[in-house]
Image: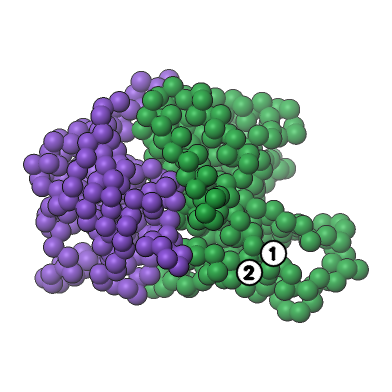
Chain colours: A green, B purple
Amino acid sequence: MRTIEVEQITQAIAKMCMDACYYLSEDVYDALVSAGRKEESDLGKEIIGKLVENANISKNEQRPICQDTGMTVVFMEIGQDVHFVGGSLEEAVNAGVAKGYTEGYLRKSVVAEPLFNRKNTTNNTPAILHTNIVPGDKVKIKLAPKGFGSENKSALKMLVPADGVEGVKKVVLDTVKTAGPNACPPMVIGVGIGGTMEKATILAKKALLRSVNKRNDHPEYAKLEEELLEMVNKTGVGPQGLGGVTTALAVNVEYFATHIAGLPVAVNINCHATRHAEAEL
Amino acid sequence: MAEVKRITTPLTKEMARSLKAGDSVLITGTIFSARDAAHKVMTEALDRGETLPVDFTNQIVYYLGPTPAKPGDPIGSAGPTTAGRMDKYTPQMIEQGLSGMIGKGYRSPEVVEAMKKNSTVFMVAIGGAAALIAKTIKAYEVLAYPELGAEALAKLTVEDFPAIVAIDCDGNNYYEEGQKPYRKI
């Protein structure tokens, strides 16, 4: 049994909120630079160049890459031998978000209730918290501030088994075409295949947390990722939707067991500011 | 790529008409920021027959909700938000005299019709280049609806603010023109 003070979680989350918003992760930065070299459109090339310049300013001056500093999504893998003390884990996570967004001069973009009143909570809480219990005595935290320009263009489709690979490709293609410039391309695309309705969407979100230069361990899914990337880059959408061959930097696919009657597919779109931070306690 | 056109505000309708889809522009002067909540409040005020806090004749509205300014800075990161969410309110705002809008993303046919009728131009700034764009904003002053926080109606003083004309006053659409040569699927 290992004891962890929830205050440590608060501190870690606060730092991760700021780090994720200021520092474009190395994998995404490198992918942007490399895409800039390959882009065929002059305007597209110039746009990617500006995005790289923007990332440099953010890093050097600790400024948010994008003004939409997102709703905070937290994935936590909790070792089953961990005992949290000092308060509620969920409250500690939210305290970390409030601290990070306030002290880091990040935008507070969360409303308490979605339909009638839409009053801003003024500290960006609550976070969306996903927890998994795993063997061991460690706590692994992955945090992603998720902007809504791209989140709004995400989609879920409950396909049937007969739709197969072609059906999955069509869902991804249609989603990317509809997203176009609204999702701030070059995008990173997370695809979740299988599970149930909600599982597919969580898989798609999780896929966005994987490095853009790492392919799925399963060879057939790795090949599918490459085919999907090649396909979406043929749409012509390009950087900021103004045309080019760089519509996406990567397509990451995650899969899970599913029902004999189903083939759920979720597509979670992220912008070029695919922000994520990780920590282990 | 066409040469960069420098424009100053107020943007007359004549100047707006001279901007063509695909043009790169640098804007200097005063522009106004408003997004979802401010648009809702303003169009509701118009429906009640009230006047708006700002006379939008020949003005440019920027769809923006910035991050808070760090001490000593005029504004935080300040990139464009998705313009399509303002579509429902836009024809009414265009009738107030707007000559320009800055945001990102596709616009509805109703908005494009209102733009053609009133000589209003839609420009896009690079979505997510928010720290870079902030360098061109020299002052930020909330004019109305401070309770909306980052969504308040504000006045921005800009110098060489970079944008690209996406849809011009004739309805030419650079999203369509720009994507076409690269569309293979």
Instruction: Using residue A231 as the reference point, say whether residue A9 is left or right of it.
Output: right
Which mark is drawn over residue B98?
none
Q: Which residue is mark 2?
A: A96
- Which image quadrant is residue A228 in? top right
Chain of the residue where label 2 is placed in the rendered structure: A
Going 61% across and 56% down the picture, which residue do you hit? A19
* Mark 2–mark 1 CB contact (< 8 Å): yes
Which mark is drawn over residue A12?
1
Q: Residues within 10 Å of mark 1 (few under 14, many from 20)?
A: many
Label 2 to label 1: alpha-carbon separation: 7 Å
Across and down, in percent, residue A263 comes to 62, 39
Residue A266 seen by the camera = no
In the displayed image of the protein, which residue is found farthest to the bottom?
A: A86
Going 42% across and 50% down the picture, which residue do you hit? B130
Chain of the residue where label 1 is placed in the rendered structure: A
Three-letter residue code for mark 1: Ala
Three-letter residue code for mark 2: Gly
Across and down, in percent, residue A229 comes to 56, 29
- Which image quadrant is residue B108 in? top left
Who comes first in sequence, dot 2 or dot 1?
A: 1
